[in-house]
Amino acid sequence: MRIIQPNVVKEDDYSGRWRFLLMLILCAMTVLIGRAVFLQVLDRQFLKQQGDLRHVGILPVPAHRGRIIDRNGELLAVSTPVKSIWINPKEFLKAEVAHGQLKALADLVGMSVKEIKQRVGQDDHRGFAYIKRRMNPELVDQAMALGIPGVYDEREYRRYYPTGEVTAHLLGFTDIEDKGQEGMELGFDASLRGTDGAKRIIRDGKRRIIEDLENIRLPVPGKDLTLSIDERLQYLAYRELKKAVMQHRARSGSLVLLDSQTGEVLAMVNQPSYNPNSRGKLKGNPSRNRAITDLYEPGSTMKPFAVACALELGLTHPNTVYSTAGGQLRVGHNIVKDVHSYGSLDVTGILQKSSNVGVTKIALSVPPKKFWAFYNNLGFGQPLDSGFPGEAHGRLADYQGWNAFEQATLSFGYGVSTSTAQLARAYTSLANDGVIPMVSLLKRDTPPEAHRIMSAKTATTVRTMLESVVSTGGTAQKAAIPGFRVSGKTGTVKKSGAHGYTESLYMSLFTGLAPSSKPRLVMVVMIDEPSAGEYYGGAVAAPVFSSVMEGALRLLNITPDEPTPLMAGRQDEPA
């Protein structure tokens, strides 16, 4: 029998493996010790930087947006400090906040518990979510006192407009980041906004700020913006325009008041308006500044310029008599009509009665190129260059495409489009002895750039003739102001529809200046689609002019140029 001996393994068979393993462990230890010595002794800055990344952070410091003030320093827009509440969802969800605490937080921020939970969500990987922004700091402090894990606050700014609806269309508003969105807030956003700063801070393990280390960059506050408007005149214009729009059940309205000498806008208002402090329920586009962005045909308010052009070229004279018998005039294949047959009228009478036939005869005596150039120099079809975003240029067709009837319609304000602000600018040429200053929405400290449009003699002559429009027998007796001479012109414009001009929709206008002896103020009033029966410019827009202009002359301490009040009669003539 053969006996099989078991294999016997010698200890020397494992010695090589043990030595290899021991050398491997010693090498690893050597590497770790060397790395530790390197980091702790030779490169300590690395660990410090890594620690700072976890505890030291850079926090932006918002810059204070510049104020907007009126020409007298009255506050129109200011950014006030507010606080916002934000949450760290990861920390909040981990803490399992009690319902009572959550309910208290919801009450303070004006939300439901369900809404807060929706803001937080179920994603515990996010580190940030806003709960409510731009809150009253006192309410935020109360929310922080609840001690809810993961709920924090931060400082921000909220724009506030003390004058509310009165200056809404002019100022515009900012968004939740305090950046300009409309109006002057948008047009001058770059200078108003300023530059944010930054500071280095230390956070604890819960990302709460526990210490400010240093200011890296100081915030640079935005520059204040001083507007040309006078808050007192702005409020007066807003009140009277709103009253007229409501009284005549009109669709809308706009009013512009200019200083004729400097070109500064002293008041610019529109209806309907809105409250820029509370825009949650706004519908459509109520924020547009109709006085500077909306265009329309100005109607008979253009007649003084047709007359001025002919006077400047020596083609007519104030005493020149024109026949308007029959109240109709054929021009090409079309007929120009007056509401009444006025017989023979001199140039003053043509403006006083607002005769389309009479002004057509004057306009057709002017070469088309000269006629176009005069209107173009007045600024029709040209930008205002006011800096206001979205301002309209208007339209004035090139004279090379005109026929006789088109030139005729231009003389009484059809076939040309303008904004209320552009029309007011054109009338400064009559008020300022033939010179048009550049229009400005900002207060001026130096004389404005200006352009001569006509001679002082022509401007004074037309201005004097326009006084007859406001006196007995004129179309705007309701524009008269006791103690002052007033020059002005009415306009009652048929609106165009899908099938041409309508017979039921009108725009009522009045453009005037005072005091006539040495005009300081120019105003344009436009009421769109009055529907309470009256629609003539002399009945709807002229009374607004009278009320606002009288108050403006008094507030600005402008000396009367008439010892006795003008007689104002009943408005019964169209324009």
Image: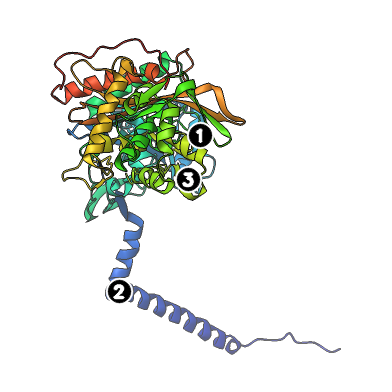
Instruction: Report x, y in % for residue 270.
Output: 38, 28
Could you tell me if the residues under marks 2 and 3 are in contact, i.e. CB atoms within 8 Å?
no
Above or below 159: residue 100: above
Which dot, 2 or 3, sits closer to the camera? 3
Q: Residue furthest right?
A: 1
The amino acid marked with disc number 1 is Lys
Of 456 and 442, which appears nearest the observer? 456
The residue tagged with tag 2: helix, strand or loop? loop
The CA distance from mark 1 to mark 2 is: 46 Å
Above or below 356: residue 157: below
Earlier residue among tags 3 and 1: 1
Instruction: Report x, y in % for residue 367.
Output: 41, 46
Earlier residue among tags 1 and 2: 2
Instruction: Report x, y in % for residue 177.
Output: 37, 42
The residue tagged with tag 1: helix, strand or loop? helix
Of 309 and 95, which appears nearest the observer? 309
Earlier residue among tags 2 and 3: 2
Could you tell me if the residues under marks 3 and 1 are in contact, i.e. CB atoms within 8 Å?
no
Of 219 and 247, which appears nearest the observer? 247
Query: Dot 2 corresponds to which residue?
Result: 43
Above or below 529: residue 434: below
Res. 267 image quadrant: top left
The amino acid marked with disc number 2 is Asp
Residue 159 in sight from this viewpoint = yes
> In the drawing, what numbered circle is on residue 117?
1
Query: Dot 3 corresponds to which residue?
Result: 397
> In the drawing, what numbered circle is on residue 386?
none
Q: Quadrant of the C terminus?
A: top left
Which dot, 3 or 1, sits closer to the camera? 3
Which dot, 1 or 2, sits closer to the camera? 1
The residue tagged with tag 3: helix, strand or loop? loop
